[in-house]
Image: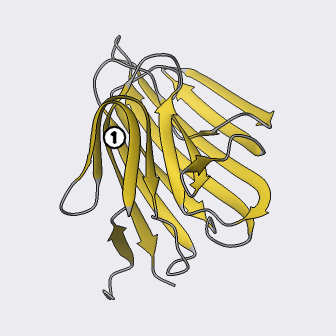
Amino acid sequence: MSKNGLILLTPTSIAYTGTSATISANGSVTFSAVSNVTLNGVFSSDYDNYMVVQIVTGDGPAPYMRIASSGTNQTTNYTLQYLQVSGTSVVGSRTTSPTAHWSGTGASAIPGGSVTHIYGPNLNQPTAFRSVNVACDPSNIVRFLDAATTHSLSASYDGLSLFPSSGSALSGRVAVYGMRK
């Protein structure tokens, strides 16, 4: 095992609906025009905490993210709180029990990217998420979103899934890193 703090992980498999998704030689996943892409086998007992880095390209919707177990997405029991800055507007919100963890770039403003820290997804306890996202919308207004999410079930998960916040398809790249204990 490397001595570095973050270890790039290769999914054991991926599943997707849409045009294409591939695992690169280094372990990141590139996807094009997909309505969902699931990375299986990225969370394990080797690490307690993870970092997910994603970039979304093109003119499409922002991505949402769900945790998954054996390829089955967890679609309930998320609580979200966020702060979004767009131009000179600042908006904060809290929701309970939405259907997905928000890890996108805010509204439909892309291209953009995000870094999400995931705490304990493979442990038999509730999972916590913290995302920092940035995007530039078509009128060149930079958007910044800082979001915290919890998933309240005490269960172990091994994967994650990205899907669009609206009906359009996603294109981009995602990489999952394990944080050394």
Count of numbered labels shown in the rendering: 1
Mark 1 burial class by Cα count in 10 Å: few <14, some 14-19, many 20+: many
Estimate the x, y position of residue 127 in percent, counting from the top left. Answer: 69, 60
Q: Is residue 1 above or below residue 107?
A: below
Estimate the x, y position of residue 87 in percent, counting from the top left. Answer: 48, 20
Query: Residue at 61% of width from left, 43% of height from top?
Result: 147
Task: Judge from the rendering whether residue 100 lies leftward or rightward of residue 158; answer left or right.
Answer: right
Element under disc 1? strand
Query: What amino acid type is highlighted by mark number 1?
Result: Ile
Q: Name the quarter where the N terminus is drawn.
A: bottom left
Estimate the x, y position of residue 2 in percent, counting from the top left. Answer: 30, 86
Report the front residue among 85 and 115: 115
Determine the residue located farthest toward the top in the rendered image.
Answer: 139
The image quadrant that residue 7 belongs to is: bottom left
Task: Judge from the rendering whether residue 80 lies leftward or rightward of residue 2; answer left or right.
Answer: right
Determine the residue located farthest toward the left in the rendered image.
Answer: 25
Report the front residue among 91 and 96: 96
To which residue does mark 1 refer? 55
The image quadrant that residue 99 belongs to is: top right
| Colour setting | secondary structure
Task: Judge from the rendering whether residue 46 lies leftward or rightward of residue 81; answer left or right.
Answer: left
Q: Is residue 117 above or below residue 139?
A: below
Q: Is residue 75 above or below residue 129?
A: above
Query: Residue at 78% of width from left, 45% of height from top?
Result: 77
Q: Is residue 47 above or below residue 128?
A: below
Estimate the x, y position of residue 49 in percent, counting from the top left. Answer: 55, 70
Query: Residue at 55% of width from left, 28% of height from top?
Result: 85
